Image (tube, rainbow, N blue to C red):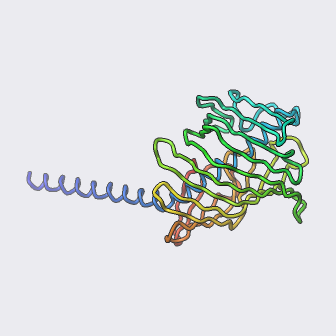
Amino acid sequence: MKKINFLIGLLMVVSLAFVFASCKKNQNTVNETSSSIDDALAERIYDNVSNIADEAYSEKSGTLKSTDVRRLFLGDCVEISLDTVSVPHALIIDFGTENCLCNDGRYRRGKIIVSFTGRYRHPGTVITHGFDDYYVDDNKVEGTKVVTNMGFNEANHMYYQIEVVGVIFLANEGGTVSWNSSLIREWVEGLRTFTLWDDVYLISGTSSGIRANGETWQRTTITPLRKELGCRHFVSGILEITPGERPVRILDYGDGECDNIATVTINGQVFTIYLP
């Protein structure tokens, strides 16, 4: 009987050690990939601000094709007001005071306030985005995003200079993520149609941030992020992220599939992450 009890006790110790090791491994994985996840979160939130504003303007001004019967981003609960008389022009996108389920699967509330000097497609146009008590999936979004239409590049693609100074107050008292970026958004497909469904952008440039724990990171583009407006996530692109004094991370959004799966490579070790 003593021998049986000893064996049972030994198995319990081994099991607890295995569980502890597994938990520690999972926690280490989260710690190693957190800066990449925070960067991806900020990139998605601020990138979609422009997509939402473009869709709202196109709908309110009547420039969408009649085939665009379904919104890509905006939910039925949103209200849009457009003033093209004042200078600069004004666009207010109001999601209401309660969470509004949008067509991209995100819950939003509050307002995106846009001032602009001309149309999105016109070279020289400057578009400034601000926020009034604006939340995405209960993450509060503050700051400014300025988009400048730079005209056409050597590839005959319209492109935009984008500057973001932002702060995200994470849901459930998760702290704040600060994110600054200087990006180029190149419109590679869909420019000459008035439907949003075929629009494709390539995004490159640099960004930096501060995580909730105070750790900083720097980011540069290796391969531009590919944004197809019909997909909720970036479908491809590779970024180099350096968190503080720790080793470089390589964030890879994949090979073109529309999914929320990405990988982070650190010192040759590959981690799979699932984007929010």
- Seen from the viewer's position, the closer of residues 118 and 87 is 87
Task: Look at the picture and state if 36 lies above or below 106.
Answer: below
Residue drawn 40% across and 60% down? 25
Residue drawn 17% across and 56% down? 7
Residue drawn 77% across and 56% down? 185
| Location of residue 83 by image quarter | top right
Residue drawn 68% across and 44% down? 130
The x, y position of residue 247, in whole percent, is 52, 71
Relative placement, left or right, of 90 versus 142 is right
- Seen from the viewer's position, the closer of residues 117 and 168 is 117
- Seen from the viewer's position, the closer of residues 142 and 170 is 142
Relative placement, left or right, of 246 versus 150 is left
Q: Residue furthest front?
A: 87
Relative placement, left or right, of 26 versus 67 is left
Task: Look at the picture and state if 69 lies above or below 216.
Answer: above
The x, y position of residue 187, in whole percent, is 82, 54
Task: Look at the picture and state if 230 lies above or below 150.
Answer: above
The x, y position of residue 238, in whole percent, is 66, 63
Q: In this figure, what is the number of numbered marks?
A: 0
